[in-house]
Amino acid sequence: MIVQEAKRFNILFKRIASDPELLTSHISLFTALFICWQRKNFRSPFSVTRKELMSYSKIASIATYHKCIKELHESGYIRYEPSYHPKIGSLIYWNVK
């Protein structure tokens, strides 16, 4: 199962890498999402907090974080369901086809 997910994820990563609209901050956030997914044993959906994603991605600005997560969602790379609660993580679904 994990091998199949890894292959599908690789397709998504190639798509992101070739997208001219995405900046290094998007790639960094995407990598942070991957780390969180890995730490949650590759379960989907998985929960994340802004604090952990900003830490892993090295994004210092909350505005940049929100812009990037929103654009990854709107571009169809992820489905982002915010919790709006500081201790309950938001849900992330990979949009791998």
Image (spheres, rainbow, N blue to C red):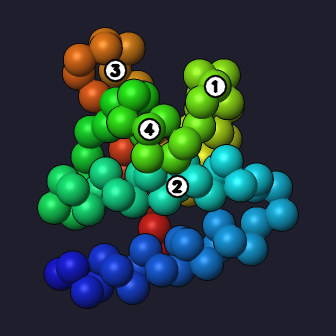
Label 2 crowd bin: few (<14), some (14–19), many (20+), radius 10 Å: many
Image spot of residue 36 (x, y percent)? 31, 51
Of the numbered discs in the image, which one, if any, rests on residue 92?
none
Query: Residues at badges 4 and 1 in contact (C-beta under 8 Å)?
Result: no
Relative side of 36 to 78, left or right: left
Q: Nearer the viewer, mark 3 or mark 4?
A: 4
* Image position of 76 with respect to 19: above or below: above
Q: What is the spatial separation of the Cα atoms under label 2 and label 3, in whole angstroms? A: 19 Å
The residue labelled by disc 1 is: 61
Lower position in the chain sequence, tag 2 or tag 3 = 2
User: Label 2's element?
Assistant: helix
* Mark 4 or mark 2, earlier in chain: 2
Residue 55 is marked as 4
Q: Is residue 84 above or below residue 91?
A: above
- Amino acid marked by disc 4: Ser
Q: Residue furthest right?
A: 20
Looking at numbered disc 2 in the image, what kind of residue is underneath it? Phe
Q: Marks 1 and 3, Cα distance to the nearest angstrom? A: 20 Å
Residue that numbered label 2 is attached to: 30
Whether residue 62 sits left or right of residue 1 in the image: it is right
Q: Quadrant of residue 13?
A: bottom right
Identify the disc placed on residue 83.
3
